[in-house]
Amino acid sequence: MSCEHASTTTVLWAYGELDDDAHALHVASCPACSAALEALEAAERGVAPVVGALGLEVAPVVEGGAAERARRRAPWGLLALAAALVATLGTALYATRPHADPTEAPQAVAVHVEPAPAPLPAWPDPAALDDELDALELELDSLRSDPSLL
Amino acid sequence: MPLPRTPMDHPVEHRLRESIAPLQGELLGFLRRRRPQDAEELAQEVWLRVTAADAPEEPAALRAYVFTVARRLLIDRHRRSRTIGTLVALDGGRAAETTSGGADPHGQAVATEVLEVVERCLADMKPELAQVFRWRTTTDLSFQQIAERQGCSLNTALGRQHQAARRIAAALDEAGLSGRTR
C-alpha cells in the first residue's frame, strides 16, 4: 500500500492549501492516501486540546526570529553602525593626540600616499551580515563602557 | 405555470440525495465522536460539499468520498478551534484546558496525558520532523513558508508533516487517547 501522493499532494490538500475536487476523489479511492488523511486528522484532533502548550515550546520563528530579523535588516543598518564606530574612534583618537603649537614654524613632512584599497568583497549573505552586525554592536558597547580601550 | 427548477430537481442530484440518506446516521455518529460540539453543523457542510461536487454514485465509493470530505473538514475545524484552549496550571505542572471539557479536572488530566505523549513523541523524532509539525500545528505558516524556513523543498516539508503526524497518531492510539475507531 503506497502512493506517491500520500506524503505530498494529499497533505497539501488535507490542510486546505490545494482545492481540488479531483484529488478528493483520489483520496477516497486510494488506501494509502486515506490512511494518510486519517493519520493527519487523528494527530490534529489529538493535539487540538493541548496546542497552546505545544506552542510554548516553539522558538519564535514567525516574527522576531533570527532568520527573519536578518532578512528584514537592511544593509544600511550595518553601514550606519560602521560609520558610527569609525566616527567614535576618530573623535577619541583626535582628542588624545598631542596638538601642534601654532606659533612654531611648519616643518616639512613627507607625503605618504596610501595604496588604493582592495576592492570590496561580494556582499555577504544576510546571516553573515547579521553575525557581523552583532559583533560590531558588541565592540561598540565595549568601547562605550571602557573608554580606556581607545 | 411550472415551478422553477431547483438544483435538487436534477435527476442525478436527486439520486445522490437518495444515496446519501442511509449514510446520514453513520456520518453524524462519526462526527459526534470527534467534535460533539458542532457535529450537526459539520454534517450539513459535508452534505453541501458532496452534493456540490462531482461525487461518485456507486454506494461504496460515495461512502468513502463522504468520509474523506468529512475528515478534511475536521482537520480544518480542529485547527480553527485551537485558539480556544487556554493553559491552566495543574498540580504545579502545566496542562491545557480542553476545548470541549472546559476546566473540569478530567479534561485537564486527559490534556496533560496527551501533552506528555505528544511531547515525548516529538522529542523522539528527528528535529526537522518535529519542527515542521510544531510550526504547522501552532502557527499559520503555510507549507511553502515552512519549506523556505527549513531550506528544503515543498515536498520534503509535506513528507515531514506526514511522517510526524503518523507517529503522533500512532502514539496517541497506543496510549488509548485517539479514539480512531470509525
Image (cartoon, rainbow, N blue to C red):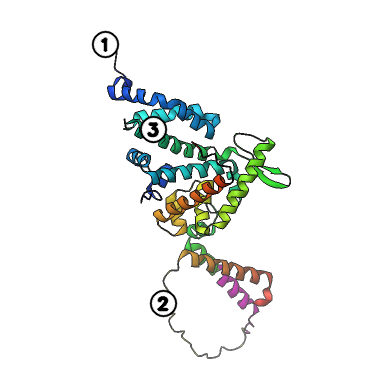
Measure the alpha-carbon separation of dots 2 and 3.
70 Å
Q: What x and y, as percent, mark residue B172? A: 56, 46
- Secondary element at tag 1: loop
Give the vertical position of A144 relative to B29 (above or below).
below
Residue A1 falls within the magenta-colored stretch: no
Magenta stretch: helix, strand or loop mostly: helix
- The amino acid on which the numbered mark 1 sits, given as a three-letter code, is Pro
Mark 1 lies on residue: B2
| Residue A82 rendering spot, x and y as whole percentages | 53, 69
Callouts 1 and 3 close, C-beta under 8 Å: no
Nearer-the-camera pick, A21 or A42: A42
Residue B131 x/y as whole percent: 52, 55
Viewed as shown, does residue A52 lie left or right of A28? Answer: right
Residue that appears at 41% across and 35% down: B69
Furthest-left residue in this view: B1
**Share a chain, discs 1 and 3?**
yes
Q: Could one spot residue A58 in this view of the protein?
A: no
Q: Which mark is residue B80?
A: none
Pointer 2: residues within 10 angstroms few (<14), some, or many (20+)? few
Chain-order first, disc 1 or disc 3: 1
Q: Which residue is mark 2?
A: A119
Q: Are marks 1 and 2 on the same chain?
A: no
Q: Quadrant of residue A120?
A: bottom left
Picture coordinates of residue B155, whole percent (x, y): 39, 54
For residue B63, the mark is 3
Q: Is residue A68 visible?
A: yes
